[in-house]
Image: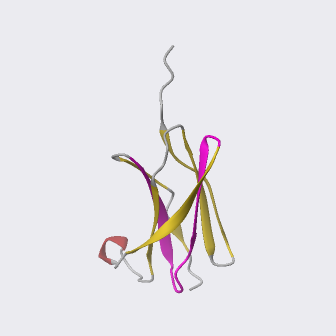
Amino acid sequence: MKRRNFLQLAMAASQKDGMFEVRFRSTKPLEKAVLISTADTGFTGNREWVESSASLEPCGNEWIAKVPLPVGSNGWFVNVRSGNLTASSNYQESLLH
């Protein structure tokens, strides 16, 4: 049986001390990770979203994206890319800011 390469949605995410970390499972090499965040409130489609580069480290079949959250962020997620494929973490929201 032929083994297939895959790119999977985020497996786990955490936030601590202003850093956001998310793990993706992929047999394909990931090329780029980007944090997409907002400090705006209201309907998400009307908010201004900002992109920030995230570090990306391979760890076996997992990839770890790490990025500091911009001050005042109250909504965010991470996208990773492999060629023309994109996977996203779950949307995270904080009402504390």
Q: Nearer the viewer, residue 75 or 2?
A: 2
Q: Is residue 20 above or below residue 8?
A: below
Q: Give the residue drawn at x 60%, y 83%.
A: 96
Is 68 inside the magenta-drawn segment? yes
Closer to the camera, 45 or 57? Answer: 57
Question: Which of the pair 4/72 is nearer the observer?
Answer: 4
Image quadrant in which you'd find residue 20: bottom right
Q: Position of residue 30 (x, y in %)?
A: 48, 49
Residue extending farthest right: 17
Q: Quadrant of the C terminus?
A: bottom right
Image quadrant in which you'd find residue 40: bottom left
Could you tell me which residue is drawn at 65 percent across and 42 percent down?
A: 60
Tell me what residue is drawn at x 33 percent, y 46 percent.
84
Q: Which residues are magenta?
A: 60-82
- The picture places residue 48, in percent across and down from the top left corner, at 34, 79
Q: Residue 58's spot in the image, x, y percent?
A: 60, 49
Q: Is residue 71 above or below residue 68?
A: below
Queried whether the magenta region covers residue 81, the answer comes back as: yes
Residue 62, image x and y in percent? 61, 46
